[in-house]
Image: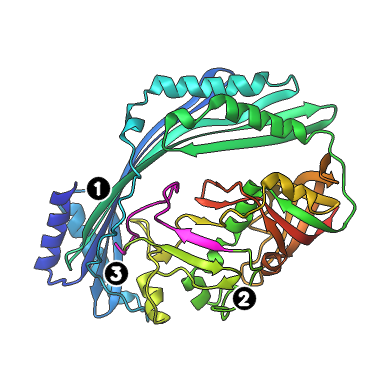
Amino acid sequence: MFEKEFEQIFNIAKKRNIKDIDILLTKANSFSVKIFKQEVESFKYADSIGLGVRVLINNSVGYAYTEKLDKDAFETIINKALENAIYIESDDVVEFKNYPEIEKKLHIYYPELEKVTVKEKINKAKLLEKTARKFDKRIINVPYLEIGDEKTTTKIANSNGLQKEYTSNLTYGYTMCLAHEKEETKSGMFYKFSHNFNQIDAEVIGNESAKRALDLLEAKEIKSGKYPIIFNNEMAATLLTTFAGIFSAKSVQEGRSLLKGKLKTKIAKDIVSIIDDALLDIGFSTRPFDDEGYPSQSTNLISEGNLQSYLHNSITAKKDKTKSTGNASRSYKGTMEVSPSNLFIPNGTTRADDLYNVFPNSIEIVQLSGMHSGCNPISGDFSMGAQGFFWENGQRKYPIHNFTVSGNFLQLLKDVVTIGDNLKFNFSSIGAPSILVEKLNISG
């Protein structure tokens, strides 16, 4: 795919005596439908394509991109990349290599998803809304509801013989419901990703989102203090997402991570492990290579409480005199960064339902807000608005709201009491099971 276009770029580079160049192309197709009161509110089918080049001149890298794939556009972006290489100064050591292929055969493209008709998607979205609305008369609105799918093709090549590409796709469904009773309105959301359209169960998603909203009605306020805290699997994943950047070697090297200087030290409870696995069978960011063409791998970041590794691309790896972990990240428009793939806390050995029996009293957190403004990746401190439930002797007593939960992320990792068995991934391909923490500050 796109062999002709890539050959044109290499020929232009050769005529300009450019010995080191790489090309990254991304092609994406997406579909989504939103329903409101059984009518199609929005219907979106989007195609996008873009191509970015990097040129290496006298150890300086220049970037440029185009969304128009013709010879004139290729001439232009090579000229711009050459200009940028002249004016951009950096100490980064960049090499374009012909990296090997992975041995594992990944199942990330599902052709049967292409066969699902638009009518089937619309009908599923209508059923999703109908299910949520009829769940209870107190469900007054379903403001957010979507059924969609995505397909992405990534192709990368360089002047040293690298030539790789892959295509992946997935489908999803989600909804948010509003429940109202007396003077109180609460929201509930539920989502599902899959490679199988039949697994996007409209009735399950609709019923669960409605139930979540209803469960939060008649909420009380909680007295300030220190409490054992249970982050349900979605909120544990949200918390991990908020601090995912601390594992980036680039952030560490630039002094923007609280993990600076902590490599090979104990930073968490023995039962805590965190893995980044681009080869994960069930992952939605699974891929055979990263945006340098470096082969994907599974990386143990924290193992039995010990910080074993950061996430690297080839540039940060050279600075730390180590190997890349296959986490180079770059859009065709941007420069080279470091990003996780499928980042997650593995399942623990405790049944998720049993977490509520460990302490006589505990607070379950099911919604968080203010993650970006209330979290500091350098200090690890966080303070976030929350909603949840008060538990007593293993029984959910009542919903609680209007409180903040605060603490420090590293201290939280040290205070983990036990981990559930219900791992779930979020929209960022970051996942976690439910987690019980010995204590955190609650301000009512």
**Does the magenta segment cover residue 64?**
no
- 100 is higher (above) or lower (below) than 423: below
Image side of residue 99 versus residue 366, left or right:
left
Q: Which residue is mark 3?
A: 62
Q: Which is nearer the eye, 271 or 288? A: 271
- 143 is higher (above) or lower (below) than 334: above
Task: Verify CB contact (< 8 Å) between mark 3 and mark 2.
Answer: no
Task: Magenta stretch: give its range.
Answer: 273-294
Q: Which residue is mark 1?
A: 68
Within 10 Å of disc 2 (Cα), the crowding (few <14, some 14-19, many 20+) is some
Majority secondary structure in the magenta region? loop
Q: Which residue is mark 2?
A: 266
Q: Which is nearer the eye, 322 or 158? A: 322
At mark 2, the secondary structure is loop
- What is the x, y in percent for residue 389? 79, 43
Distance (Cα) linking label 3 and label 2? 40 Å
